[in-house]
Amino acid sequence: MVSYALQRLPAETTVARADMRVKFALLLLSSSVIFVWNSILLQAAFLAIVLGLMLSAGVTATTIRKLVLIVLPALVLITVIQGLWSPFGRTPVFTVPDGVPVLGSLHIFYVEGLLFGLVVCCRVLIPMLAFQLVFMTSEPNDIVLGLVRIGVPYRVAFLFSTTFRFVPLLFQELEGIKEAQRLRGIDIDDVGMVRKLIALGRMLVPLIMICLTKAQLMEIALQAKAFSGSADRTSLHPSREKLSAAEWLAIGICFALLAGAIAGRMLYGLGGKVL
């Protein structure tokens, strides 16, 4: 999971070269417009756009498939629940014959419920894939600079960057602990679900101790460098302070799509129906 969920993508693609402010606009759009639309067609079209951006950025189809497999059990459960009990249900998919005791004439799944379940799945997949795209095409320093340039205090941006840097380290330490267990004849990946949960719970103790140790070392390093968190700082590439015309256009398109989606839903009911 670590290799594809946290991999870095080539920096020469158009998406990777885009300013962080453009990527933040994309994240805002992908996290907001999905709740404006109930239409499966509009949701599927937007999901296709996000997938197209991922492919153009160098994300392989195998990586996308593995990312989807992470949340696939939850997506299936969501679809089943909506298909059985969604208030949108009108057209039954299957009806139990009248001769069957207790369950006779019971409707099993509704077309509208299943479609709305797919809408909810799109609402999960779109922001998840968009965030993966941004993180895989951005350096931690670029994320900090992007947050500062949109007005976020430097200390908050630094904390966010530090958290982002710690995620792969935590996965590496977890893999190291699992390797140590394998050397002792315990392969956690090959045991049952219950034993795996118990083993992972026991692994949290050394993992937390390692995290606390690393945090203490970072604190000592920051104190040794007299870190103050002052916003009065210089950047390596000051020319990137200004957005290009294409980047302004991309940001404008994101905000225009969001505003248009909200206005279309409120004034004309666009996207309000599942179909």
Image (cartoon, rainbow, N blue to C red):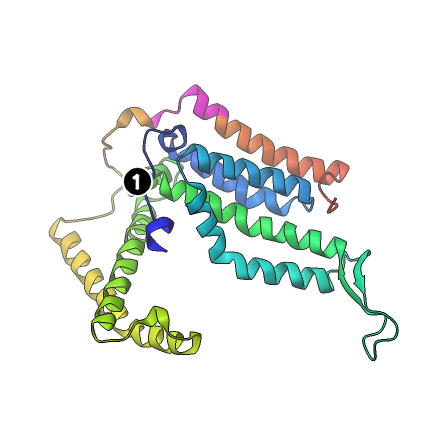
Q: Main secondary structure of the magenta part?
A: helix
Q: Residue furthest left?
A: 224
| Front-lying residue, 13 or 102 | 102
Q: Which element carries disc 1, helix, strand or loop?
A: loop
Q: Residue furthest top?
A: 245
Q: Does the magenta stretch include residue 149?
A: no
Q: In which quarter of the image is the C terminus?
A: top right
Describe residue 253's horizontal placement relative to residue 178 as left or right. right
| Front-lying residue, 200 or 191 | 191
Q: Quadrant of the N terminus?
A: bottom left
| Front-lying residue, 30 or 70 | 70
Q: Is residue 247 magenta?
A: yes
Residue 167, x across and y down, in percent: 31, 55
Vertical placement of 25 versus 64: above or below?
above
Residue at the spot 21% in from the left edge and 75% down from the top edge? 184
Describe residue 142's horizontal placement relative to residue 68 as left or right. left
Residue at the spot 14% in from the left edge and 49% down from the top edge? 226
Rendered image quadrant of residue 114: bottom right
Residue 13, x across and y down, in percent: 37, 29
At label 1, counting other C-alpha atoms closer than 10 Å, the crowd grade (few under 14, some 14-19, many 20 or more) is some
- Provide the residue designation for mark 1: 139
Q: Residue furthest right?
A: 98
Residue 180, x across and y down, in percent: 21, 70
Residue 109, x across and y down, in percent: 74, 62
Residue at the spot 88% in from the left edge and 72% down from the top edge? 98
Name the kind of residue labelled 1 in the image: Glu
Rendered image quadrant of residue 136: top left
Q: What stretch is highlighted in magenta?
A: 241-249
Vertical placement of 32 versus 57: above or below?
below
Rendered image quadrant of residue 148: top left
